[in-house]
Amino acid sequence: MSELNLDKGKLELGDERYPEKINLFVKNKAPLYYEGDLSLTDRPAVGIVGTRRCTKYGLAVTKEIARRAAAYGIVVVSGVARGIDSAAHREVLQAGGQTIGVVGCGLDVVYPKENKDLYEKIKKHSLMLSEYPPGTQAHPGFFPHRNRLISALSEAIVVVEAATRSGSLITAECAVEQGKEVFAVPGNITNIYSMGPNKLIRDGAKALVIIDDLFSEIIKRRNAGKIVGMDRNLNALEGLGDDEKRILELIAGLGEVPLGEIAEKVDMTVSETNGIITVLEMKGLIFCEMGRVSISNFA
């Protein structure tokens, strides 16, 4: 993990540090209060949202998505609420990744109160954001405004579990308006908290049946130039791990190699290899098409 640039303060409209994603995707912008590493707003991110009254299934899915995000270097964005939100934040931090918590109250107001430790962990290891000045208490009317920021900061939104009338569905609506991809986790049709995601799928959202599909979408959007702050440059080589360098050198040496042969040639598991391939493609160093991998023209 790269060194964090921890700070706190207020960002006025027009400040050069004001998150570019929010500038691009939010119409009625407001000054932002922040605490943590503001540079995380430039990173590729996935928004994970859902009900406060989640099931064991919902928690398990949320944790797996958050762990995968950490492995791929993708920031997890959520609202620091009970249930799905808290599980997403906690799991990505536990896995060594980073997260952005967007709240509908002042950054000095802990809501819900049992998340005091989570607030502090996010401020210390990632980033907390709010449109509301210190001392502002949480209010139901503030959460829809918070949700549009969660969507703006994310390349894709995942709705894990939600009732048919839920703030998570507002986040999904914001994502559609902002041109983001919406994924929904299908669930038991007799479970009230699966009704929201199932309805989204019926209405056109992508069913998240294979978690890697989510990260493939983020990569696709990155390569289409839709992710802010991901530079394709030669300096990217300096931050590679040993296994990443080994796979990159293999691809460079062969010119082009079938995806299925890479794991065998570098003596790694298919799962490990696919994770590294995903990261290298996100960094713009390789290009994958029709099951074959080659060096990117940008590398």
Image: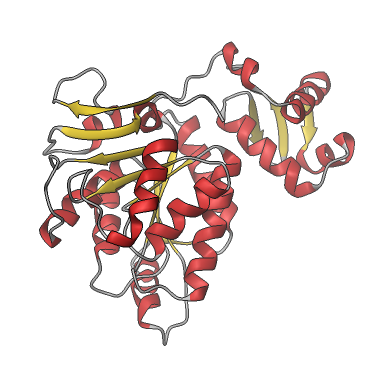
Which of the image's four quarters has the N terminus? top right
x and y percent of residue 12 in the render?
A: 14, 25
Locate residue 138 relative to residue 279 in the image: left or right.
Answer: left
* Residue 243 point in image, percent of width and height: 76, 30
Kindly identify the residue that appears in the image at 76 percent across and 40 percent down.
Answer: 259
Q: Is residue 104 above or below residue 33?
A: below
Image-quadrant location for residue 226: top left
| Quarter occupied by residue 38 | top left
Quarter holding the C terminus is: top right
Residue 289 visible in the displayed image? no
- In the displayed structure image, the side of residue 21 where residue 259 appears, left or right: right
Front residue of this view, candidates 215 and 101: 101
* Residue nearer the viewer, 120 or 223: 120
Residue reaching furthest to the bottom:
190
Could you say where residue 163 lies in the image, as x and y percent from the top left? 30, 75
In the depicted structure, whether residue 158 falls above or below residue 274:
below
Total numbered circles:
0
Percent across and percent down for residue 92 are 51, 48
Name the residue rendered at 37%, 44% in the picture.
Answer: 120
Residue in front for this viewpoint, 106 or 290: 106
Farthest residue, direction top: 234
Q: Identify the colour scheme used.
A: secondary structure
Please indicate, yes or no, whether residue 62 appears anywhere in the rendered image. Answer: yes
Q: Residue at x 22, y 28 (%)?
A: 9
Q: Horizontally, is 292 left or right of 117 in the view?
A: right
Question: Residue 258 is drawn in which quadrant?
Answer: top right
